[in-house]
Amino acid sequence: MKIIAIGDSITEGFPYTRKESWVTFLGQELHCEIINKGINGDLTQNIHDRFGRDVLAFNPTHVIILGGTNDAYAKYPLEIVSPHFTAMIKMSQEHGIIPIIGLPIPSLVADDEFFLQQYRNWLIDCAKMNNLPLINFYAPFLKRLEAGEESKLFVDEVHPSLEGYKFMAEIVKNDVEILK
């Protein structure tokens, strides 16, 4: 099994290094290699544009696609964002790679969260319609936020703390069937 995680700063591990990302923590938990292809500041269009060189060129068995936070910050409507996810899913499937959809974690910025929730709803529907595995990073984060753990999970309004990144890895590890 060879896994690539592609996305934005939340995949990369910002404001830390890739060594402190959820991707690295997950690889350590599962004792396997997971290649981190997160880039700080990327929009879904950027992720889509580099999908060939960052995913297809590595010929992985699985790709975890997690993005949308920067699109929400830029206030891009769903109809601008969804075609990029659709294209990445299609490219994966055409190359025999299992695409796994990651639902973005909550943003503590209400305006951003408005857009992110639209993206999440669409991603859930897309995964169901295409029988794709889905990693729900959102619901467990929301549950802990509702319990008042904001300061434990975030370093700012968008990016996870080290505990937040470890929690993201734990979410995937607890649903390891998703990687089969």
Image (cartoon, rainbow, N blue to C red):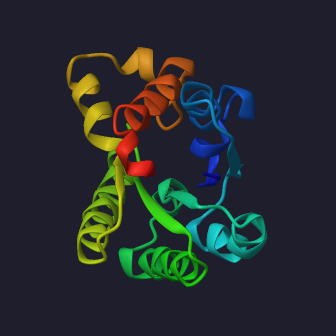
In the rendered view, would you say 158 is above or below 35?
Answer: above
Q: Which residue is drawn at 43% across and 27% down?
A: 170
In the rendered view, would you say 158 is above or below 45?
Answer: above
Q: Residue 9, how many percent across, how many down?
A: 63, 45
Report the number of numbered marks.
0
Q: 9 left or right of 29?
A: right
Q: Which residue is drawn at 45% across and 50% down?
A: 179
Q: Residue 71, how many percent across, how many down?
A: 51, 63
Q: Residue at x 39, y 74 (%)?
A: 77
Q: Which residue is drawn at 56% across and 76% down?
A: 96
Q: Residue 153, how many percent across, how many down?
A: 43, 22
In the rendered view, would you say 119 is above or below 174?
Answer: below
* Residue 106 appears anywhere in the view: no
* Residue 53 appears anywhere in the view: yes
Q: 31 left or right of 167?
A: right
Q: Residue 27, how many percent across, how many down?
A: 61, 34
Q: 90 left or right of 53?
A: left
- Who is closer to the viewer here, 129 or 161? 129
In the rendered view, would you say 21 is above or below 117?
Answer: above
Figure quadrant of residue 30:
top right
